Image (cartoon, grey):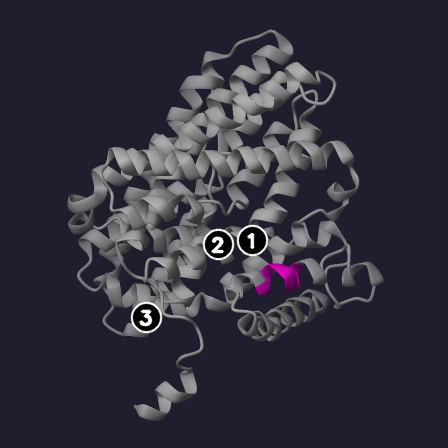
Amino acid sequence: MQIYLICLAIALIGSLMLSRVTKLLHLPAVTAYLVAGLLLGPYVLGAIGLPGLGFNTMEQVEGMSILTQTALGFIAFTIGNEFRISQLKTIGAKAITIGILQAVITTVVVDIVLIGLHLCFPNIISIPCAITLGAIASATAPAATLMVVRQYKADGPLTKLLMLVVAIDDAVGLLLFSASFGIATALAHGQVSILAVVIEPILEIVLSLALGAVMGWLLERVEEFFHSRGKRMSISVAFVMLTVGLSMLEFHIGQVHIKFSLLLVCMMTGTIFCNICDTSEELMDRIERWTTPLNILFFVISGAELDLEVLVHPVTLLVGVIYIIARSAGKYYGSNLSCRLTKQPKPITDNLGITLLPQAGVALGMAITAATLPDGSLARNVVLFAVLIYELVGPALTKRSLLAVGEIKPEGRTSARTLNAQK
């Protein structure tokens, strides 16, 4: 067990030191954390085999999944804070419209391109694989976006809209993937399951929102028993951990497979809590400080999970490059069109799509399911390759877009030492 502690400590220290380098290059700190994970992963330093110096095997990385799941839960809980009723009244309907349209358009664009690739070269990719990748393309990573927003204290119309759209994107992506994967399975095996295509996805979303609502209400009730800031923060942390644990439960009722979406559950918990608790903003700020090291480790481990072996497969690289180009075009033009329809200002219309490019955890989870298709290994490897590119480039593009609309303050103008000295 001590090896795990040493490994996590080195990961945390190494990623923070590397962030000093990315700061000089004017790159977001999250890029440093991901690169640190790659370097400490089983394909670089971990390959040396020295215990404690990086992650020696992929099994060791996967053993850290409880940390990444917990961090993702806190990230989703924080994003739920964006769904305040006062804010939803002003941009809620527009955010929902944009969130749905851009996801659907992205899926359609990727489907058309990859099905076209199949028609030209049937041996490279099958139609079931193409349809599944199209649905996976709709997913956007909320974690990288949130870290960039936090680091640069981003605030403004684009930032507010972005956080809502990223949250909505998860629910839309879940439905699109479930439907597309059901169709792909039917094409591959000649059997259609209405249960898997329609009923189970809708149940997953409804039950996730219901569980999140209950946990958010319970958290507010329990908070009333404590007056100390430290105890209130501690009970909030405990409740988020409990919510993460409950959202990972899976069971069957008859033929129906019941499961929850961790992101949706924790987002809903944060949404309900923030709308009924008068002191939620203060608590959110304190929780954000507490979870900073956890979030850093989330990205380090995410970087270590990236399989560099996919880079040696020509077919994966070919399909991966086409997938990345098609998805990027779908996200950009889909967001552009939906922003025009909802009459967003030109700066938002031109930049929102770029901020939606990051892709990670949700897409990887979908890829694991897609791997059960006859040629599902291609879908998995393509997503792994795309995540590698998007996670390294996406945060910098998000920063650039927020900077272009004047909603972030460039890093380095102030420091914690200076601020503390002024107090």
From what the image shows, is residue 21 above or below residue 423? above
Residue 171 placed where, x, y %? 39, 35
Q: Please, what is the three-letter code of the amino acid marked with disc 3?
A: Lys
| 33 is within the stretch colored magenta | yes
In primary-sequence order, the first of circles 3 and 2 is: 3
x 28%, y 43%: residue: 213
| 135 is within the stretch colored magenta | no
From what the image shows, is residue 151 above or below residue 352? below
State how many labels appear: 3
Q: Are marks 2 and 1 in contact (CB under 8 Å)?
A: yes
Magenta stretch, overall SS: helix
Q: Which of 362/315 is in front?
A: 315
| Element on which disc 3 rests | helix
Q: Please, what is the three-letter code of the amino acid marked with disc 1?
A: Val
Q: Look at mark 2 in the image and give the residue it sits on.
A: 397
CA separation, marks 2 and 1?
A: 6 Å
